[in-house]
Amino acid sequence: MWVQRVIEPTGWEPLGVSVDWAAIEAELGVPLPEDYKQLYETFGGGVLSDSVYFLGRDEAVVFAFLAQWRVALSVDRDSSFAGTSAVDPYAIYAPGGKELVGWGSTAWADEYFWLVDAERSDDHPILARSHDGGAWDRYDMSTSEFLYRVLTDADFLPFGIARYNLGTLFEAGSGGPSGGRPL
């Protein structure tokens, strides 16, 4: 239901991307949310409203979900940063753990993650942090509901962008960055 609600205002024609979910989830060591899989298969990866980046599939690395996760994990585990994580007090998810997996961001550096727990693989609460790097906000809703509210609900503070009248156009990310880089 929520995936369709994200599609409607964008006017996007679903891509029907074929995805080897078993391979992706085997690398992560945990299943991904079902509605995210539908969003991924529908949109690939790209930019909504010229400002909300959605990670999925992309020929370039910019919007590629797994590539972005691998880079974030590598940086988060880099010993030269003396144990400091960019997602403090959390860490980037490593297989078998309980940490964050990024799936989206905005042009002004808001960040969207799932709190993934390998022992509770059917639970994917969203943790989001606004551009000021302040406190994390937790949302117990699906990825598509969160994304829909970001795009269409001006009162969904601090993340709702409808109040800025940016529209709801989706631009596929293949071929490189468009106006900025996610995460």
Image: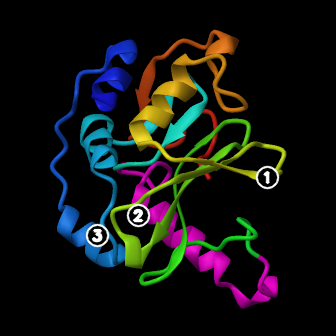
Assign a secondary structure to mark 1.
Answer: loop
Type of amino acid under label 3: Glu
Residue under the point 57% across and 18% down: 153
Assign a secondary structure to mark 3.
Answer: helix
CA gap, disc 3 and disc 2: 10 Å
Residue that label 3 marks: 25
Badge nearest the viewer, 3 or 2: 3
Badge nearest the viewer, 2 or 1: 1
Could one spot residue 3 in this view of the protein? yes
> Dividing the picture into quarters, in which one does residue 27 lie?
bottom left
Lateral position of residue 7 relative to residue 13, left or right: right
Q: Earlier in the sequence, mark 2 or mark 1?
A: 2
Type of amino acid under label 1: Ala
Lateral position of residue 139 relative to residue 27, left or right: right
> Dividing the picture into quarters, in which one does residue 67 lie?
bottom left
**Where does the image place residue 82, in percent across and percent down from the top left?**
81, 87
In the image, residue 167 sits, relative to residue 92, either above or below, namely above
**Where does the image place residue 136, in percent across and percent down from the top left?**
72, 53
Residue stretch in magenta: 58-84
Contact (CB < 8 A) between labels 3 and 1?
no
In the image, residue 144 sits, relative to residue 127, either above or below, namely above
Contact (CB < 8 A) between labels 3 and 2?
no
CA gap, disc 2 and disc 1: 26 Å
Residue that label 2 marks: 66
In the image, residue 152 sits, relative to residue 175, either above or below, namely above
Type of amino acid under label 2: Leu
Foreground residue among 128 and 71: 128
Could one spot residue 178 in this view of the protein? no
Residue that label 1 marks: 135
